[in-house]
Image: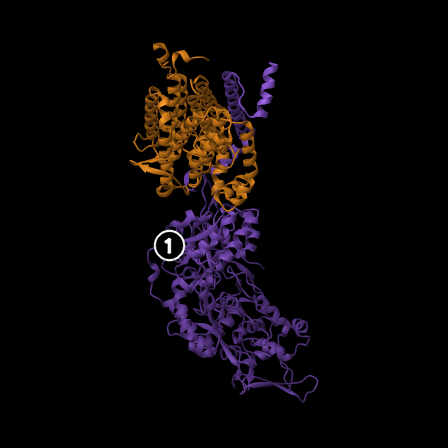
Chain colours: A purple, B orange
Amino acid sequence: MGLMTNNRRRRWRTGRAEPQDPAVELKGKLNFLKIIVVLAFAVLTVQLARLQLLRGHEFHQRAQFNQLRIEPVIPSRGLIYDRNGVPLVENVPSFSAAVVAADVPKLRTIEIAAGLDKILGAPPLETTLKIEQARRSNDPFTPIIISDGLDEATAFHLREQLAKLPGVQVVVEPVRRYTAGSVVSDALGYIGRIDAQEYAARKDVGYVPSDHIGKAGVEATYESYLRGTPGRREIEKDASGREIRTLNQDSAKPGDDLVLSLDLDLQKKATELVQQAAHGGQAAAVVMDVHTGEVLALVSLPMYDDNIFSGKIDDAKLQQYLSDPNKPLVNHALSEQYAPGSIFKQITGTAALQEGVATPSTTITSNGYITVPNQYDPSVLYTFKDWRVLGTLNFYGGVAMSSDVYFYYLSGGYHWYGQNFDGLGADRLALYARAYGLGSQMGIDITGEASGLIPDPTWKEKTFGEPWTIGDTYNMGIGQGYVAVTPVQMVRVTAAVANGGTLLTPRVVREVRDSQGHVIMPDKPKVARRLPISSDNFAIMRDAMAQAVSWGSAHQASLPDLRIAGKTGTAEFGPRHADGTYDTHAWFSGFAPADTPRVAVTVFLERGVGAIDAAPLAAKILDYYFHRPQQIAAPRPQQPLGQVVPQAPGAASAGAPAAMTQDSPVAVDPREERP
Amino acid sequence: MNLRNTPTREFDYFLLLVAVALTTYGALLIYSGSLTSYGSPSAALSHPVSRQVAFAAIGLLAMFVLSRFDYRAFGPLSIALYALSIAGLLFVLFVGSTAYGSRRWIVVAGTQVQPSEIAKVCTVILLAKYFSDHEEQVRSLRVFVTSMVIAALPAVLVLLEPDLGSALVFLIIWLGMAIVAGARPLHVGLLVCAIAALTPIALLAAAHGYQKERIDVWLDPSRDPLGTGFNILQAEISIGSGGLFGQGFTHGTQTQLDYLRTQTTDYVFSVGAEELGFIGGVVLFALFVILLFRCLRVAGHAEDAFGRLIAVGVMTFILFQVFVNIGVNIRLIPVTGVPLPFVSQGGSSLITLLASLGILQSILGHRRKRARRI
């Protein structure tokens, strides 16, 4: 053996084969190969055991996660109908391109952004940034929307290219189509993609970043009803994202439907009439049921089409709206405030009667103006004009002829030149004006209402650092000066006068019904307060307003077969012209029928004269309301509405406006009234 | 001397049995792995299982024929066979069909043929012939280098396809055969050191190539979770989720929901590991160990160096391919596309393997009775 070892060692040195038993050598080599085989499989077995036995549980869960996804089921958004059951919206499918950042290979982000640019025209830099941002966020699995509102051809083309664009998805979502078009945009509003702020506030109630949410109008205020309850679906997906089967499902609960108080037919007609009178300027008209506070028509001109916000926002149209000086996106009936002019005399008048400042027989003579000496320097005289010389008038005449002098006396009094007439004074007048709901928000159920402004001495001191003067009181008494109101606020004032003193909260939604047609929020007037004015005094004011139409300043609002009561207003605004005149807003606020009031109407035209422009317009709207053909007795298109008719007596008005069934002057549930 | 010239006619039925067992194991996994693409367990001729069974039949036929055929006749034919297979590799480079970004196939009579599989056996035969012809000078550098060139030529052609996995197979075949043939350990050692030293440089040089990316992705599959990394991650998940007993045959969610790619070829092991578990994996390993040991037994019983070296060459390439294929599946080594012998779907590989075993059977059966020793 020693020899052999020696031989072997020498072999390395000499590099020459040494005699050796080849069989033994071969056996050694083959054994070496056997050891290699065993070692190789030992290594494989150890690694296999590590994966399957030590980490098996972890991988089992990952395999489960691979195939099981929990996806939200978006409920179908509630529909919106007009008061007669005419549908105003539809849910239609919209295609969007979305990206799941977690599925986008890091190195291919730019390539994929470029691919999306080619197909969709989405700016690649923006796309890349969005993906990077989502990748770094704690939820890279939620799809982020790259491009909204794709047309079908583009969506189809993108779908074909998905294999080349890992992480990209085509999302189909329902969006709104507003079938009635622009005429109801202000009431309906629109929905849009939830923004970061809204999402932060609502993520706990089940919203996801790609959700839509009501942004304006009843879409926003009734969001919680319209949205419904999202469901959940546990689904099995294969590697290419195809659904294999649904394992478990919590169905989504569809959103509740809204029945608006708006009467689409009246709304359309009123819009058309206001358009004719407005000559392209800003204008508004509101028709309200005087017993329920339901808004039957809400017109704001110029209009906008809320469909531009559905799906892909139409930027060109939006820019056009935003640059229009007449601000079509602003609801001029609710969100803009103007000086009311003489329609404010309803407030001054009823306050004066209630406070005993005036009685129906109080007479005041208008010589066309009054003069007031400066309180420090009596030689300085201030003149306050009437719109013309009107002579001696009692209360009815003062209202009917809209005498400014008459209302200067009632508001500020007159204690000069031998006269001694005590007026209401600014504070008392402000108190009544605020009782009528002016200067604060009404709580109407659509977004964006302005408060308006009712001034008083304290307010003026605080705001301008100047003392209140008698002139301020006079101006306030005739709805000028600092007074600012919205058209909806004024229709509410008129409705309160008409119904005998119940201040109602205006609303555009009558009822909320669930998808089965059960009424969730019944049709019930919302009473803000009972005004502290006696019903006799309201009757006097109603009579005076009826006379204004029958022989007074609002005569152009008179109709042969309908007794209308109303008050015109011509409010000065803007800078004084060289000839001493101002531009004027035209107002009319009235109700009909004069004896048994059912509806109130307020119209506002940015430029015009109340008696000439606003009064006839209001009359036409009222004429249409009372005398239109009974075309809306058409069959009801929507089942849910049909089903519930027996349950909701207030809705049993297929052929006629609901107000017709309610004849008592104050149709307000007494329990709702507050002392 | 009649006795002297009578062949033993020995046939290793055990080797045949193990090969059939492995092929059956493979066919079952191919069946499970192709359920999603072929819907029903259809008996159609185009079904991958029917095709695999047909290939197995051809391969077994080749095995029996070759077992009766004296392997020594391959000696004079070896140069011609080698030249033909090199021609096949050249042909595939210029007019081959492309799949997964490389050209590996040519289409013969409507069937895809992968010349690199046939080239492996032809290279084994030529190397065996060369080493046995130069048994006396086997320790010389000239023989060492010449034999290396014989293996390197097909390796380079395969590398150009590009198919790094198969290229490595040629070098490993040569290495295994050279060691058994008796090459100087000094030469082998120096070569291994040289390769070890050159590997990082080669990797850097190929920094833009697909191999570099594959290695990067292997190290961090999340670089490309839906691309190359997808396979790595999904194979790991499939195998891991199998646990001890597996999810059950045809019940692996990863396989049946198409999370695995190439689940009947390169990733067929993952299907088995998911559905049959650790036990199924170990059974497969055992079958391979038995097969390889039977091959080594042939090498030990071979009458001459030519037969012995063929047996070692065949054993080496089977071992290497099994190790690389499973190693890729269980994330032990970077992705290289090498089929799992007997198990992966593919006619060229299966027929070549069964035919090679036929040559091994011939080596056993054509010994002279007198020559039996061990």
- Tell which subunit mark 1 falls on: A
User: Where is B121 relative to A597, above or below?
Assistant: above
User: Where is B192 relative to A126, above or below?
Assistant: above
Tell me where residue B210 appears, x and y as whole percent.
48, 43
When asked about the image quadrant of residue B309, the answer is: top left
Q: In terms of depth relative to the viewer, which is nearer, A547 or A571?
A: A571
Q: Which residue is mark 1?
A: A152
Tell me where residue A262 appears, x and y as whole percent.
43, 61
Q: In terms of depth relative to the viewer, which is nearer, A319 or A608?
A: A319
Q: In terms of depth relative to the viewer, which is nearer, A278 or B36?
A: B36
Q: Residues within 10 Å of mark 1 (few under 14, many from 20)?
A: few
Q: Secondary structure at mark 1?
A: helix
Tell me where residue A90 appears, x and y as whole percent.
40, 55
> Horizontal placement of A455 versus A131: left or right?
right
When asked about the image quadrant of residue B249, the answer is: top left
- The residue sitting at 53% across, 59% down in the picture is A527
- The residue sitting at 57% across, 78% down in the picture is A407
- The residue sitting at 54% across, 36% down in the picture is B195
Specify whether residue A238 is in view. no
Q: In terms of depth relative to the viewer, which is nearer, A413 or A207?
A: A207
Residue type highlighted by circle 1 = Glu
Q: Quadrant of the C terminus of chain A?
A: bottom right
Q: Quadrant of the N terminus of chain A?
A: top right
> Horizontal placement of B66 versus A120: left or right?
left
Farthest right residue in view? A376
Tell me where residue B127 appears, x and y as whole percent.
43, 28
